[in-house]
């Protein structure tokens, strides 16, 4: 399993899209930092705002970059790994050897989770550094719920938990994208399929709005004002999507 992960990791970084995506993402993070540095208030939505401080800077930075990460960078890397390798012929070359298809999919899923975790970690680290360098530090911080105030340590844990929830949303997206790439034939159609699933799921139930508006869901969840189920649908998308895709990969001849 480790060798499969190492081999897939090397192939992933040999593709130009991976390195270009990382460089573009770092540039966007830095530009958003400059944008936030010029702001005095951080906005949770069109109505609720709080003073922008060193303690909450990283949270609002994640809000700025999350949409780009969920709709552009994440899908491109995931689809390129799951679907692009098949259409490019690399997957057939790998599967010439006696390799378990389910193990190969698991290796890809784990590697993509690690890469997406790197993007999230870069955002958090840069946000914390910029926030403490360029924004005032305060003793007490209020987030979306005005009745709850947090110390500096409490605010740090609040931001860390919010990042953790966002990472879980990314993993749910990863599982669903893997399933979409198994069903649909080409990378472009897969991307449109992911957008269609993310948008269309909200018409099925507002419970799945976290797929497209993850930070809005996290803000409300952390404030205790989210009125829909969140954790169960989140893990449902993650686990069910992963299980169905692994089963399908093992049964479909076109990946062998």
Image (cartoon, rainbow, N blue to C red):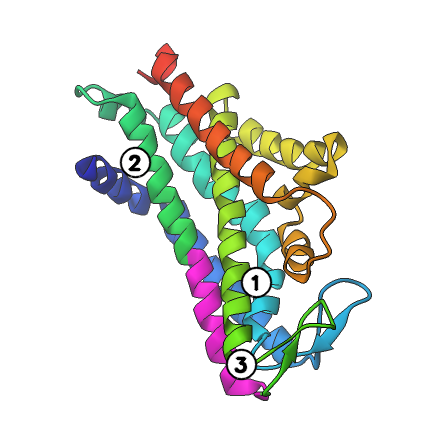
Asked which quadrant contains residue 31, the reply is: bottom right
Q: Is residue 81 left or right of residue 25?
A: left
From the top left corner, tell me how far across and down residue 235 is, in percent: 52, 38
Q: Earlier in the sequence, mark 3 or mark 1?
A: 1
Depth order, front residue of 126/209: 209
Q: How far is the residue under mark 3 from the one under mark 1?
A: 18 Å
The local secondary structure at tag 2 comes to helix
Residue extent of the magenta highlight: 119-137
Q: Residue at x 59, y 74 (%)?
A: 56
Q: Which residue is mark 3?
A: 152
Q: How far is the residue under mark 1 from the one under mark 2?
A: 27 Å
**Majority secondary structure of the magenta segment?**
helix
Q: Is the residue under label 2 in contact with that under label 3 (CB below 8 Å)? A: no
From the top left corner, tell me how far across and down residue 72 is, in percent: 56, 47
The image's mark for residue 107 is 2
**Neighbourhood count class around disc 1 (C-alpha, 10 Å): few under 14, some 14–19, many 20 upward:** many
Q: Residue at x 25, y 39 (%)?
A: 5
- Position of the N terminus by quadrant: top left
Q: Residue at x 56, y 80 (%)?
A: 151
* Residue found at the very far right of the displayed protein: 47
The local secondary structure at tag 3 comes to helix
Q: Which residue is mark 1?
A: 62
Q: Is residue 122 visible?
A: yes
- Is 141 rendered above or below residue 60? below
């Amino acid at each position: 399993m480790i060798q499969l992960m190492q081999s897939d990791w090397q192939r992933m970084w040999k593709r130009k899209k991976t390195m270009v995506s990382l460089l573009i993402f770092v540039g966007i993070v830095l530009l958003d930092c400059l944008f936030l540095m010029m702001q005095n208030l951080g906005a949770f939505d069109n109505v609720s705002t709080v003073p922008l401080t060193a303690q909450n800077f990283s949270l609002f930075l994640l809000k700025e970059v999350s949409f780009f990460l969920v709709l552009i960078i994440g899908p491109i890397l995931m689809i390129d790994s799951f679907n692009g390798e098949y259409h490019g012929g690399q997957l057939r070359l790998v599967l010439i050897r006696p390799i378990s298809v389910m193990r190969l999919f698991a290796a890809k899923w784990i590697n993509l989770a690690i890469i997406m975790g790197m993007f999230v970690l870069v955002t958090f680290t840069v946000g914390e550094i910029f926030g403490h360098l360029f924004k005032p530090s305060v003793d007490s911080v209020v987030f979306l719920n005005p009745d709850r105030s947090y110390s500096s340590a409490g605010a740090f844990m609040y931001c860390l938990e919010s990042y953790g929830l966002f990472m879980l949303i990314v993993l749910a997206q990863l599982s669903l994208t893997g399933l979409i790439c198994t069903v649909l034939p080409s990378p472009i159609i897969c991307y449109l399929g992911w957008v269609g699933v993310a948008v269309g799921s909200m018409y099925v139930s507002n419970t799945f709005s976290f797929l497209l508006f993850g930070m809005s869901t996290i803000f409300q969840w952390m404030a205790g004002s989210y009125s829909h189920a969140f954790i169960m649908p989140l893990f449902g998308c993650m686990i069910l999507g992963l299980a169905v895709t692994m089963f399908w990969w093992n049964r479909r001849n076109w990946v062998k």
